[in-house]
Image (cartoon, coloured by chain):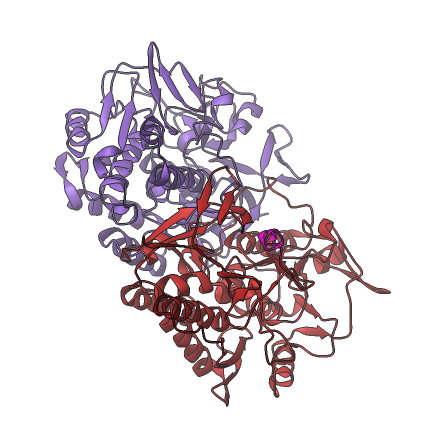
Chain colours: A purple, B red
């Protein structure tokens, strides 16, 4: 009988596994609670009104439409019954598997301060990005007509909490908005009036990155005008601003880029997790004591032979997906499984338009070239040729020109959660 | 002192008035509760997942950025105090005017059955279109995996209520989705399985259109496979389907294109309205007894020298906007105002991709040519050159190819109002 492989999650890890298994003699079902794959590394560009949602998302069905051994199911997996080899879906219904590949990813985490969520949204999904875009644009709309100088300053103050890649990129995008994107639209607002503050608890930006990148990134942020506050922790968030210990910052827009936690389903497997809820995995990426369950991507805690677990980046997920396919092929031949080895292709973050810091293949370089190189690496790994070409052209067009910005505010004035403004 | 002209609404009428006044010695404030102008005639294409929201909407600020005598205010006008010459905004605050141009448009109306709104959404805004798109795509996702044949048939039954232009276009788009757009994505669903029903209370489709267009449109709809039910009224709508008198139709998706009513602000002017809430206007488009208040576009009831009031179409609004500018110029010169005369450039509706019925300048023609001619007329009337070119290219590309469909479902499985499914 053909083996039933169920993949949970259509992000980089899940899609990579599905594509690597496309010629295997298996029946694949890919389950995701959203109908689209998201090119998450560019999500901050949607939040920053430079790209439209459709530019960075593709229906998972379309990406896998030519793959005959694969079906796609829209469903939210709430529980894994590993003994019965069965998934339970939120709307009821179950899915049975012989092999499970869990690639469910991460969600935002406010470290127990869940009431901060409404005031300081995070950036993991398209809906998050659209909500952030809405808040930024509304703040400008109101500042344009604000008569009280203090209120106007508050409306034009943007706080980003957390200086990992998402926070750095958001802060850069916010300066970009002030300096270029909206300059023509708002008559009374001068670019210098907008204040972008990046708050980080540690002693550097991009703390996960090696070499001189944190220093380079810090200088680049300061050069474009981001106010970087290191060694500062947010002690409270409310509708009018944030407290950083004793210091009060009045700000209409607060964005959260400080924490993530594993998708809740990780807690239902019954094997050890770390404090972020990520599942500890064996060297072959399987779950301890469950050789038929693999865990890949951000939701896996893989620390073998390393000081720190592998970071939650697309390259790790892509490589893990391929590795699981290789080990399943080994299983069928009766050959031993191989341990996963991560080939670090480098790291990269962008700060505003066409400004970037990169450390790729041991080479350090910056600017547009770095951005294109990185885009190339990710695109090649991912989608089919036609798609790759179309998406690349669209991104290039949208990114290199200012023609097609995406500055729509959904909903109408007076609707929606505008309590922060 | 320079006269303060306040325009309420950034649709075709409001924008047309603003642009016609761009060289007048006046201070213009355009107030809209949304930040974007919407090319409403193509809204059904967003609902049908063929175009993205950004393709048919532009920030009003951008459209008017080069116009020095005009400012844009994001605000929801809830009341006009015509004696004090003052508008009241929903969030508080007021705007004073010397001349008011009211172009606030229409909203959906369920004829007093407001509980139908949640089950049978209408199509007036981008949010409406995205909600409809979400429902259509979710219905397919669930049908793909439905095991019970009756449930599967219900999921694949789409009812459109009302056979005006919006209803006809939606029904055509739904057939297009079944026959082309989604064919590759859903393996188990055959195009013939999807049933699209267009329900109309009267004796023909496109009842407002003259000549042979209703008959031509009816045949075109039947040819693409739409099930047109004339002389049928919807007597109830619930989460499982609709009742048409004695007949029950089980359907997961019900769309409302049967009625609109004037924006609520029309009731605060204190002058007579018709049963749809539209304001009766004088021949010069001013309000009876209020020569400094003009009402244009869909929200105006203009019936001088006609059997029926002017229809709520873009051409009427565009021409009215220009006419108000001419009469304001006449006022300044001390010349008499001229009565408004509508120059009917013809009518048009599309049925699926590249199939259309048109009656333009007295010529009747169909197909792609008609569609392009109509698009040309509207675009020329509206936006600046750069924009016009970019938008036209994008639409042409998106519409003529199948490359860039927009099939994202916002939100995740299990979230949102999916009670109908």
**Looking at the picture, does residue B194 appear above or below residue A225?**
below
Residue occupying image coordinates x 23% and y 23%: A228
Residue occupying image coordinates x 34% and y 28%: A154
Q: Residue A36: give x, y in percent of width and height.
A: 47, 48
The picture quadrant where one finds residue A249 is: top left
Comparing A205 with A233, the one in front is A233
Residue occupying image coordinates x 62% and y 28%: A83
Q: Residue A166: give x, y in percent of width and height.
A: 32, 32
**Looking at the picture, does residue A268 appear above or below residue B327?**
above
Q: Which residue occupies the extreme bottom position in the image?
A: B363
Left or right of B245 on screen, residue A8:
left
Magenta span: predominant SS is helix
Magenta-drawn segment: B264-270
Q: Which residue occupies the extreme right position in the image?
A: B246
Residue occupying image coordinates x 48% and y 73%: B315
Comparing B217 with B312, the one in front is B312
Residue A241 visible, this orientation: yes
Q: Residue B94: give x, y in percent of width and height.
A: 47, 42
Left or right of B283 on screen, residue B108:
right
Image mark count? 0
**Looking at the picture, does residue A318 appear above or below residue B354?**
above
The picture quadrant where one finds residue A135 is: top left
Comparing A6 with A229, the one in front is A229
Q: Magenta includes B202? A: no
The picture quadrant where one finds residue B357 is: bottom right
- Specify the quadrant that holds the C terminus of chain A: top left
Residue A326 visible, this orientation: no
**Looking at the picture, does residue A111 appear above or below residue A25?**
above
């Amino acid at each position: 009988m053909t083996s039933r492989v169920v993949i949970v999650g259509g992000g980089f890890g899940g899609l990579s596994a599905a594509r690597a298994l496309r010629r295997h003699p298996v029946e694949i079902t890919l389950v995701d609670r959203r109908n689209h794959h998201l090119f998450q590394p560019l999500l901050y560009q949607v939040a920053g009104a430079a790209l439209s949602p459709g530019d960075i998302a593709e229906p998972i069905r379309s990406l896998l439409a030519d793959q005959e051994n694969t079906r796609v199911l829209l469903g939210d997996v709430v529980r894994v019954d590993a003994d019965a080899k069965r998934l339970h879906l939120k709307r009821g219904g179950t899915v049975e598997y012989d092999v499970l590949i869990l690639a469910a990813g991460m969600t935002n985490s406010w470290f127990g301060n869940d009431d901060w969520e409404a005031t300081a949204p995070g950036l993991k999904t398209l809906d998050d990005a659209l909500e952030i875009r809405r808040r930024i644009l509304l703040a400008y709309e109101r500042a344009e007509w604000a008569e009280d100088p203090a209120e106007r300053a508050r409306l034009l103050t943007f706080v980003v909490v957390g200086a990992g890649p998402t926070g750095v990129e958001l802060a850069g995008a916010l300066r970009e908005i002030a300096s270029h994107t909206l300059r023509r639209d708002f008559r009374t607002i001068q670019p210098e009036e907008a204040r972008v503050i990046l708050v980080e608890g540690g002693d550097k930006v991009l703390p996960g990155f090696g070499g001189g990148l944190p220093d380079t990134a810090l200088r680049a942020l300061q050069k474009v005008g981001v106010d970087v506050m290191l060694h500062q922790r947010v002690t409270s968030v409310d509708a009018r601003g944030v407290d950083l210990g004793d210091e009060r910052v009045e700000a209409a827009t607060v964005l959260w880029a400080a924490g993530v936690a594993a998708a809740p389903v990780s807690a239902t497997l019954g094997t050890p997790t770390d404090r972020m809820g990520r599942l500890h995995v064996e060297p072959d990426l399987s779950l301890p004591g469950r050789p038929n369950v693999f865990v890949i991507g951000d939701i896996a805690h893989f620390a073998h032979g390393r000081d720190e677990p592998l970071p939650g980046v697309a390259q790790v997920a892509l490589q893990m997906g391929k590795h699981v396919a290789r080990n399943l092929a080994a299983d069928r031949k009766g050959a031993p499984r191989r341990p996963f080895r991560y080939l670090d292709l480098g790291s990269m973050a962008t700060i505003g338009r066409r400004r970037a810091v990169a450390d790729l293949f041991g080479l350090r370089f910056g600017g547009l070239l770095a951005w294109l190189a990185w885009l190339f690496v990710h695109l090649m790994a991912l989608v089919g040729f036609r798609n790759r070409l179309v998406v690349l052209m669209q991104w290039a067009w949208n990114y290199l020109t200012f023609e097609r910005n995406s500055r729509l505010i959904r909903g109408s004035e007076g609707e929606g959660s505008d309590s922060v403004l």
